[in-house]
Amino acid sequence: MGLLEEPLILLFVILFLGSALGEIKIRGLSLGTSGVLLAAMVFGHFGYQVSPIIQQLGLGLFIVAVGLSAGPRFFRMMKTSGIVFGIISLLIVLVASVTTIIVAELFNLSPALSIGIMTGALTSTPGLAAALQATGDPLASVGYGIAYPFGVLAVVLFVQLLPRVLKVDLAEDLKKKSGPVRNDESPEVMTIEVTSPSINKRTLKELEFNRYNTVVISRVIRGDRNIIALNDTVILVGDRLVAVGLRSDLTKLCEDIGREVQTNLKNHDNVKLRKIIVDSLELIGKTIRELELRRTYGVTVTRIERGGFEFNQNSKWRLERGDVLTLVSSEDRLDDVEKLFSRKKLTVTNIHILSLSLVLLLGVIAGMIPFHFPKLGTITFGVAGGPLFIALIIGHFGKLGPIHARYYQPSNQVIRDIGLVLFLAGAGTTAGKGIVQVIQQEGFNLVIGGAIITILPVVAGFFIARKIFRLSIIHSLGALCGGMTSTPGLGATNQLMDSEDPAIAYAAAYPFALISVAVASQVLVFFL
């Protein structure tokens, strides 16, 4: 085993064995990157140790990637109804924190072990990082490693079993409930019957409906026919125009050209509505106007979804990877446009080393700033909170001076994954030193404590979302998974029905949970 004395050999052996362990699936479930943590704990038990510098570097990279990814939508959510999802996630973390204090008292657990169990139950690696920073005790990693598998399994089982127990039609329930996915900039649909003679026999281009700001004509209904709305489409008196836009602009258009009638989009023609995800590197950064989709492809963009929230289409908006466009046209034309938006080049990363280094430097410095709280003492955000805070701000603006933060999603994925496994390798070997002794002494209490700290927030989170905020079951489960920072739970929720709503709720709740768990992990030290 002399080779393992070489630091790099040890590191890569742990990463290899841990990754292999994480890919093993049992009934569709796997440990994922947490396999690295478990493998590292085994090596730590036998006296091997990954350098703390590698652990800190990994933590910084992971946290910055998360912050840059969440930044563009985090502050926007603060201004929209998405704050409801944030409140739900905050309440979930609050319940988990109070439960942790009670469990620590009942089972006489140490502060580091208790907080580690909480972060494992909430499957929050940034929370574990904050716990290690606050306590300076590797027992936090032990608690995390023991509680994590149960935290993953409990959320997945809850998500899968709840709809069966309640015997609810999720699609019908979603229709009845109006979750806070829409906001002040969300478009509405209005069908307007043309009665004004001044409109008769003029094309949409001649009518210049763009003077009504947000209004877009998606289709023209003439008798039983549905006609795709293009610039050269001729409008006749008696036609019904399906218009999409903000209510104020739609009302003004309606007053000028006709009267509102009941919207009925059922048709026997080949006019379809489809949601398409922006994925092509060639189109990222371009505006809808520059793409000329209506003139070139005969396709109309009616709305945009970004960061889990719906907005009226704006021809000046620059597209970002992951934007969801709602398009109206014939099926063959939609197929062509879908290929356009999904086209990829070989180059899929755009990591800017100068920017990444500056964000990390500023984040580490910010994490060293002490904050004094009366009766609680002094708290620093450390390598976990400081880089996250800086990355959220810079991610929101996209560019500050020489710092470029809008990386393509694969870039963030690379940074996040490398950082995460490096951090877990270091944290695992540190925790592994005393794991056997701790399990022998506190094994049963750790399992029971982890179960309680997982189950109570799960039940409370669903109750708050469903009964207090009256969300649909699918939105409630998505918010619950975000509040528990459970990606496997989101995967299970997505399998319940063919809808993007779970991911929308998850995306809205996750950033709040990410930050609040990190803060709670540090504050709890003063209560335990």
Image: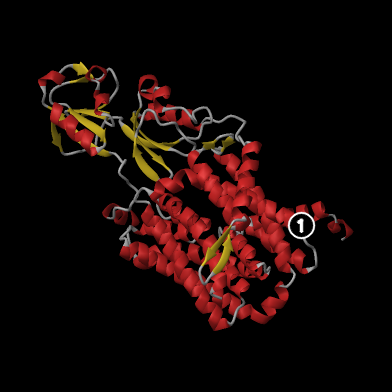
- Please tell me which residue is depicted at 64% across the width and 64% down the height of the picture: 132
Residue 274 locus on image (x, y percent):
37, 36
Q: Quadrant of residue 357?
A: top right
Residue 257 locus on image (x, y percent):
14, 26
Q: Which of 132 and 30 is in front in this view?
A: 132
The residue identified by callout 1 is 51
Which quadrant of the figure contains the C terminus?
bottom right
Q: Nearer the viewer, residue 353 or 41?
A: 353
- Please tell me which residue is depicted at 60% across the width and 68% down the height of the picture: 116
Residue 295 locus on image (x, y percent):
36, 19
Residue 99, can we see it? yes
Which quadrant of the figure contains the N terminus?
bottom right
Q: Is mark 1 on a helix, strand or loop?
A: loop
Q: In this view, does 255 lie above or below 41?
A: above
Residue 403 locus on image (x, y percent):
58, 37
Q: Is residue 111 left or right of residue 256?
A: right
Q: Is residue 223 above or below residue 425?
A: above
The three-letter code of the residue at mark 1 reads Ser
Q: How crowded is mark 1: few (under 14 residues within 10 Å), some or many (20 or more)?
A: some
Outermost residue on the right side: it is: 2
